[in-house]
Image: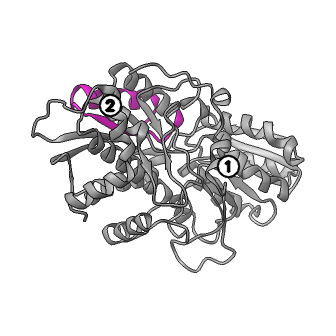
Amino acid sequence: MASQKQLSSFTRRTVLGATLGLAALGGTAFAQDTGPVRIGMIYSKQGPGAAIGEFLQKGSVLAVEQAGGKVLGRPIELTWLDEPDPQGSQQNMQKLITENHVVAVVGGNYSSSALAMMTVATREKIPLILPGAAAGEITGKSCSRYVFRTQATVPVQMRGLMPYVGQLGKKVYFITPSYAFGQDIVRSSRALLKDVGATEVGSDDVPLNTADYSSYILKIRQAKPDVVVGGLVGGDFSNFLKQWNEMGMRDKIPYVAVAVTDTDFWDVGPQASSGIYIKPWYYNNPKNTAAEKKFTADFIKKYGRPPSDKSWSGWIAMRSLLESITAAKSTDPKAIVTALEHWKNTEGAFPYGYRPWDHQLVKPAVIVKVKSTIKDKWDYFDVLKDTSATEAETQKAFGSKEEIGCKMGPL
């Protein structure tokens, strides 16, 4: 566990720009008390996203423990509430602010819930860092000065994945969840079909918590696509992949998708797992930084298994928040927002952080393929490549101001 002195030294290295950027606030001298710094978390505790929520929460908690359980010399108090649906998530966001008096919230895996939570964050002027939601509008037309996002948008992910789709075949079938995220997948993919020389032969929007996928799989079989592009999440994806295997489709039609997490495959098991996927991070990637390798080692020591990519998302979201509070020398929401806008991680091949004009974390993802033979009960993937090799390529992949369409208001 890192000492406060070690954390402060590390923070100076990674977020120096944040301290400099606070000049716009007229200094950093805000009244402080000695009580706990209260931070909220909103992650699923039930339904198909429960496993995802658990690993997001574990990653966030570990970030706090690695910081010594304190920030600004004050103990950190975490409160974890559920992400059951958009309305419930919005109500829990309000509860954290009005009843728990949090200085910031980390959470929101589903895009539909995230969009609902954003309205509260903006109205109440409390920073919200989303570690999972991927709908483009979150950092696009619905962007907010108080909302940040670590997950790459759907268009960015599809630009990285669609070249592989084109290599697998020319006839594409879509199976996606029936909310904003799934609609984003289909819209983004259709815009790229011509570029990879492919055509669409079918599409299905699937309701959340679908237990029986046999009718959908029969439709796919009848359409005879060369490749299936998906975006089912959590337990829904696990159910689909199990039934895909049971109906003999695993080795017949390749499956390619976004929004998967390691827990999905640990649930499915090695016999039914297959496909090519894009992920924000993988624990066994040789390119992981020293801090990420320590995160993996600490996670295994604490929980007895490796971290999923969702654990990394929860970890980096919480870590960026704590380092920004330290750089701001304040728990004032405006000071935290300004520090987050200047936060940088400099440990890897090139720095990454939140773009100040749309608050999107700009960082390459990795494309992975399920191993042909899985020998380790946790290590299911071979890393094929990063989605981009340079900072310039990454910035281009994430889009320009004109493409994104974010028009952010003042603090």
**Image quarter (top left, top right, bottom left or bottom right) of the C terminus:** top left
Residue 130, picture quadrant: top left
> Is 199 on the left or on the right of 327, as rendered?
right
**Which of the numbered marks, if any, corresponds to residue 124?**
none
Q: Earlier in the sequence, mark 1 or mark 2?
A: 2
Rounded to the nearest angstrom, the CA distance separating label 1 from label 2 is 31 Å
Front in this rendered view, residue 73 or 268: 73
Crowd class of label 2 (few under 14; some 14 to 19; many from 20; radius 10 Å): few
In reply to whether residue 347 is colored magenta, the answer given is no
Is the image coloured rainbow, by chain, by secondary structure, or in one colour? one colour
Q: Quadrant of the N terminus?
A: bottom left
Amino acid type indicated by mark 2: Ala
Range of magenta residues: 82-111
Left or right: residue 159 compared with residue 358? right
Can residue 270 be seen?
yes
Q: Report the residue at 63% width, 41% height from top.
A: 398
* 222 to 86, vertically: above or below: below
Amino acid identity at mark 1: Glu
Indicate which label's residue lies in the foreground, 1 or 2. Answer: 2
Q: Which residue is disc 1 drawn over? A: 393
From the top left corner, tell me how far across and down residue 169 is, in percent: 87, 55
Estimate the x, y position of residue 85 in percent, counting from the top left.
Answer: 45, 33
The reply, left or right, for residue 243 in relation to residue 219 is left
Which residue is at the far bottom?
375
Q: Residue at image x 55%, y 60%?
A: 349
The secondary structure type at the circle numbered 2 is helix
Instruction: Decide which of 343, 142 is in the foreground and name it.
Output: 343
> In this figure, which residue is indicated by the disc labeled 2?
23
